Image: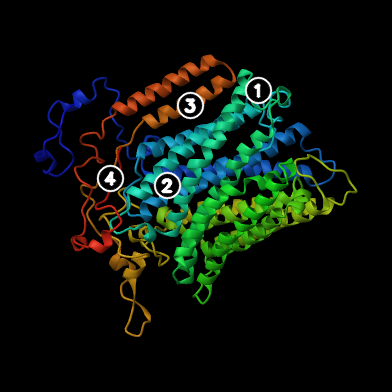
Amino acid sequence: MTTTSPETISAGGPLALPSGEETRRNPLGVFARPTATEGWRSWITTVDHKRIGIMYGVSSIFFLVIGGIEALLIRAQLAAPDGQVLSADAYNQVFTMHGTTMIFLAVMPLGAAFMNYLIPLQIGARDVAFPRLNALSFWVFLGGGIVLNSSWLLGGGADGGWFNYAPNNGVTYSPSRGIDFWNMGLMLTGIASLVGAINLITTCLNMRAPGMKLFRMPVFTWMSLVTQFLLLFAIPVLTAAQFLLMFDRLFGARFFDVDAGADPLLWEHLFWIFGHPEVYIMILPAFGIISEIIPVFSRKPIFGYPFMVFSGIAIGFMGWGVWAHHMFASGIGPLSVAAFSVSTMFIAVPTGVKIFNWLATMWGGRLRFSAPMLYSVGLVTMFTIGGLSGVTHAVAAADTQQTDTYYIVAHFHYVLFGGALFGFIGGWYFWWPKVFGHYLNDRVGKVNFWILLVGFNLTFGPMHILGLQGMPRRTYTYRDGYGFNLWNMVSTIGAFIIAVSFLIFFWNIVRSYRAHKANPVAMPADPWDSRSLEWSIPSPTPPHNFDISPTVHRLDDFWHRKYQENAQGKLVRVATSEEIAQKGDATGVHLPSPSYWPLVISVGLPLVAWGLIFSLWLCLPGGLLVVAGIYGWVLEPATEPGDHHGHEDHGPTTTDDAGDAEATADAPAEEAAPVD
């Protein structure tokens, strides 16, 4: 092993290596790190958290479109009685894949897109703690999505619902390979989620800028941190159940075989111990997003910041104690029913705290109803409706009547679509200028919002009525004369209006990009007069994030540099955004080099998954790729001599930050650097 002398390090410029060291570091000539900064190679080898966040976003929107097409097929089938669009078997596959795709491949990774892009920026870091692990997380997620959807080409999709209850998920009741694809695909996405959770938790705890105490982190970062802890403990529970199911289906084990004495409630318990925290895994990032948007467009700080943070933490804890309300109709016993009824009612308390805090933030503010704010208000309204219908599930007697009816479908779509997706779309409009350097057209965004709001309520509002009328869910048709015709037709019309709203959104992306290319206008760093650190750096965000490592003195530090109280206690503007936006020299900023190996490992894992389903021989090349990827990863040099990523320090710091003992208390003494 060779070392570099301190004299060489202090000379400035890229890390200089002694003559001949490059040859010794790459003895086989295959471990050189890639250096492309443009073109497709730069994207498939990138370890930059911003690019990975964008790739998460693009992939999840792609899967969102697939899930949306599946939803339209469902609604077309149910538009009229005795529908003939889908057979019963095809309907089972479509509604199973719709739920699975939307939850695991669309909504969850949309949250990951925001978290990957924004967390390092909001805490003043140059990247996440483990950049190559970050890339691995994305590629494994994409591999899982491909495995899951490859079922459409290799024999048909899963047909047991997104929950795949035992014993219906066994080979006796589902002999096709669809559930095997479901199982393998979700295990891969689970690996991706775990890797990402460990990475982002480490980033939040170790990579904060000087002075960025935990209770100076923006609410979005806080909600993301809670989400990552939920993932860290919830995903292994599902993975354990999936391992047992894999051995049942592929190797003849009998963990869920009722004929062999197994208890099917084992699957339900394992699945819902994961499944209910999963609701908050999807919704908390959206709560964080609108907690950033509402203060900016209300021109007020968030009301009750500590309560917002602690209610998010409380939701994270209490989310573990309500899983059995999904099983009230399973015969779990009166004591369990009573206990979980109470816990389900209690979890409404911290959620209500958040709703009232958002309303209090808007109260008395100078509101601007631009597109991001409209979506945020839409989330508060739609989620409140979904939350109120959810409280009725805490009453076991009512829940027993409602379960397995369309009332449940209405409830969780108001929560997850009206909550999570409204928040994410608002986030797209809000952070689009920071990511791409130009606005999305606001007028089109408002039209987009209102059409989506109408379509959403036409689709899912009538499902409450259908559920109370007794229409069962998961059935592919219904007879004429049951009283379901009208509201099903209304619901189907609403679904196609939602599809139109998304077409408008995609058209807005293309239209806004073309307008920017035809008449490029430099985007200011802080176009919304915002509060958190990401708005203190140029738009779009430069590869190195911060020219100068920031020092934080209080919550909303960037905003307080623009506004201060005068002698009369009135808030006045003391500086423009341009005056305090970062202006530095990026020379010497440390960035990790790109890498091939996360992609190599991720190509191997789907081959292993397909091999377990079709032929164990196919596992051999997959396993070899994984081993080769790990081997190359370990031997890969930290950086390549002469490439633009390498350097000898962690970037300049401001001189006026020195000695600020109060600011640096309870935070890293200096900026931590990514480790790979």
Q: Which residue is mark 4?
A: 673
User: Dot 2 lies on which element?
Assistant: helix
Q: What is the distance, in whole Å, between disc 1 and disc 3 at their CAs?
A: 26 Å
- In the rendered structure, the answer to whether residue 575 lies left or right of residue 390 reads left
- In the rendered structure, the answer to whether residue 606 lies left or right of residue 221 reads right
**Residue type, label 2:** Asn
Q: What is the distance, in whole Å, between disc 2 and disc 1 at their CAs?
A: 40 Å
Task: Determine the image quadrant of residue 147.
Answer: top right
Residue 511 visible? The answer is: no
Q: Earlier in the sequence, mark 4 or mark 2?
A: 2
Question: 404 and 59: which one is in front?
Answer: 404
- 1 vs 3, front mark: 1
**Residue type, label 4:** Ala
At label 1, counting other C-alpha atoms closer than 10 Å, the crowd grade (few under 14, some 14-19, many 20 or more) is some
Q: Which mark is residue 254?
A: 1
Q: What is the distance, in whole Å, between disc 3 and disc 4 at their CAs?
A: 29 Å
**Residue type, label 1:** Arg
Q: Which mark is residue 605?
A: 3
* In the depicted structure, whether residue 164 falls above or below residue 119: above
Q: Which mark is residue 116?
A: 2
At label 2, counting other C-alpha atoms closer than 10 Å, the crowd grade (few under 14, some 14-19, many 20 or more) is many
Q: Where is residue 163 drawn, in percent x and y?
A: 65, 38
